[in-house]
């Protein structure tokens, strides 16, 4: 028994270390890391080392656990000031947009593949949810307007809730006997949000007043609270996933003790969850069946990318306030990334024995691989082509710094990229709000403290300390200067002249 445990630990540690190293390799090659993790799972499986794993129910259970951690990390790192303006559009995309996507894909699959309506709609439901892990991992590395990023992140954090309910309903062999609470989607979402808000607010109050004996207990407590939100939501027959996200947002935007350590711990857990989830899904798939699913995957993928996603974004933009223009809508349509979530959802009908579930799982697996290669690799060029890039988005630097925490301040980093109008601007011409200051400029590998008349150059990297009260104003100011240079005082945050 001990020998088997030792071997399992050896294999597990090796897989984890290889997966961590693969992040660096995939970044250099421009290959999404989730594909590397899936490949590791396939190589460990029946087509590689011969490890046979076909427990769909266990995969579904562990997949849900991984998604809880991933969504919690997304909520903890989301900033309310950026999320608030896009909440209406994100919620509409996560509900009305999901419904539109399910219907469109279902109609196309029924007509072109000849599947019955129940299975056709199940294809649409499984693939209608954007993936939180893929969105968080991909978009945060790009320089994009905060509103677009926040819209996609909030949508991916919220749309799992209605989609899981629809998939369970369609996969159930006895839909007629379902109780009323399973049919009340509005109750599921409203109660999930309320529970998440309640748990987050209570957790914020407790963590700010508790005197825990060790700093390492605060990250455990914060993540534990998000899991508690999911469990409370599930027990109340509400949306546990939405409860997790809302609780994470509330906790992440509170001035908690050891906040940096909390975010760092959640980030590490999310990486472990992603690695474990993708490797497990790679183990579950049977590579020999995948070529037979290629035609169905291409048909469903074409319907999703060319019809369902653009139509769901367009309809949601008509209903919700504050929707972006056609360029932003086009980007939202293309950046609706699919990753592990559709594959995990496909294990639901597989675990309950729904007829045709194996073909559904294989088609979704192939489709996710194709989408990841095509979409994730082209998001940056598409953003530049549509003109929605933001060359001067300040990024928060995650460092453990007690003085900054006590001062309620953040450390921001911004680079002067080619084409940025920051080049040539003097430090004093930035006119940052009181409470924000450029503390260091790194140029050609050497750092120095800038003077008011220091002129910025292309390639410079700036470190800025900003108090919480003025952080948003400092970022708006930097964005305006990047787009308009010294004339930024005559223009607004978006680089447009104010009238």
Image: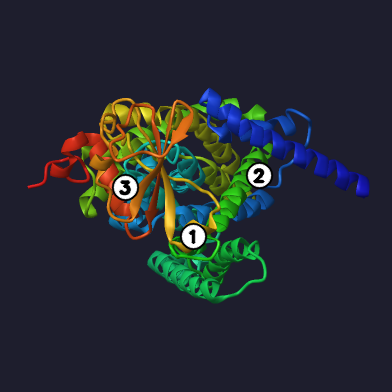
User: Comparing marks 3 and 2, which lies closer to the viewer?
Assistant: 3
Which quadrant holds residue 235? Answer: bottom right
Q: Residue furthest top?
A: 29
Asked whether 378 or 262 is in front, the reply is 262
Q: CA distance from mark 3 to mark 1?
A: 19 Å
User: Comparing marks 3 and 1, which lies closer to the viewer?
Assistant: 1
What's the residue at 60%, 74% (across, down)?
211
Which sits earlier in the primary sequence, circle 3 or circle 1? 1
Residue position for label 1 = 405
Q: CA distance from mark 2 to mark 1?
A: 33 Å
Q: Residue furthest left?
A: 499
Q: Position of residue 388 (x, y in %)?
A: 28, 35
Number of other residues with Cα within 10 Å of mark 3, as a class: few under 14, some 14 to 19, many 20 or more: many
Asked whether 300 or 493 is in front, the reply is 493
Which sits earlier in the primary sequence, circle 2 or circle 1? 2
Q: CA distance from mark 3 to mark 2?
A: 36 Å
Q: Position of residue 337 (x, y in %)?
A: 44, 39
Residue 26 lies left or right of residue 165; in this view the side is: right
Contact, mark 2 vs mark 1 (Cβ under 8 Å): no
Number of other residues with Cα within 10 Å of mark 1, as a class: few under 14, some 14 to 19, many 20 or more: some
Asked whether 472 or 199 is in front, the reply is 472
Contact, mark 3 vs mark 1 (Cβ under 8 Å): no
Residue 336 lies left or right of residue 230; in this view the side is: left
Residue position for label 3 = 475
Residue position for label 2 = 276
What element does badge 3 sit on? helix
């Amino acid at each position: 028994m001990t020998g088997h445990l030792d071997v399992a630990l050896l294999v597990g540690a090796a897989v984890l270390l290889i997966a961590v190293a693969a992040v660096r390799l995939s970044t250099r090659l421009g290959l999404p890391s989730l594909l590397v993790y899936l490949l590791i799972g396939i190589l460990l499986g029946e087509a590689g080392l011969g490890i046979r794993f076909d427990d769909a129910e266990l995969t579904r259970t562990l997949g849900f656990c991984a998604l809880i951690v991933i969504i919690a990390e997304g909520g903890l790192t989301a900033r309310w000031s950026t999320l608030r303006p896009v909440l209406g559009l994100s919620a509409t995309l996560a509900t009305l947009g999901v419904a539109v996507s399910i219907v469109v894909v279902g109609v196309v699959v029924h007509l072109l593949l000849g599947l019955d309506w129940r299975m056709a709609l199940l294809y649409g439901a499984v693939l209608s949810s954007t993936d939180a892990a893929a969105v968080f991992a991909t978009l945060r590395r790009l320089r994009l307007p905060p509103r677009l990023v926040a819209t996609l992140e909030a949508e991916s954090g919220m749309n799992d809730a209605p989609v899981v309910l629809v998939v369970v309903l369609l996969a159930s062999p006895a839909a007629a006997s379902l109780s009323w609470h399973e049919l009340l989607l509005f109750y599921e979402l409203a109660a999930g949000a309320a529970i998440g808000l309640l748990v987050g607010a209570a957790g914020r109050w407790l963590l700010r007043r508790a005197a825990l004996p060790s700093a390492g207990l605060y990250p455990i407590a914060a993540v534990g609270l998000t899991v508690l939100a999911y469990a409370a939501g599930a027990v109340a027959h509400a949306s546990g996933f939405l409860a997790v996200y809302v609780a994470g947002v509330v906790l992440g935007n509170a001035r908690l003790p050891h906040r940096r350590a909390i975010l760092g711990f959640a980030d590490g857990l999310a990486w472990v969850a992603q690695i474990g989830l993708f490797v497990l899904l790679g183990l579950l798939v049977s590579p020999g069946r995948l070529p037979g699913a290629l035609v169905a995957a291409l048909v469903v993928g074409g319907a999703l990318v060319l019809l369902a996603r653009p139509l769901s974004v367009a309809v949601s933009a008509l209903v919700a306030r504050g929707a972006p223009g056609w360029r932003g809508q086009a980007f939202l349509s293309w950046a609706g990334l699919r990753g592990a979530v559709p594959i995990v959802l496909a294990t639901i009908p597989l675990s309950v024995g729904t007829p045709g579930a194996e073909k559904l799982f294989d088609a979704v697996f192939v489709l996710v691989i194709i989408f990841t290669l095509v979409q994730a690799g082209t998001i940056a060029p598409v953003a530049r082509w549509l003109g929605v890039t933001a060359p001067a988005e300040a990024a928060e630097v995650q460092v453990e710094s007690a003085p900054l925490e006590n001062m309620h301040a953040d450390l921001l980093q911004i680079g002067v990229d080619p084409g940025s109008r920051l080049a040539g601007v003097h430090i004093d011409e930035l006119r940052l709000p009181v409470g924000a200051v450029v503390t260091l400029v790194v140029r050609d590998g050497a750092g120095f403290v800038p003077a008011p008349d220091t002129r910025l150059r292309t390639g410079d990297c700036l470190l800025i300390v900003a108090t919480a009260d003025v952080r948003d104003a400092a970022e708006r100011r930097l964005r305006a200067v990047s787009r308009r240079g010294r004339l930024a005082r005559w223009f607004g945050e978006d680089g447009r002249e104010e009238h």
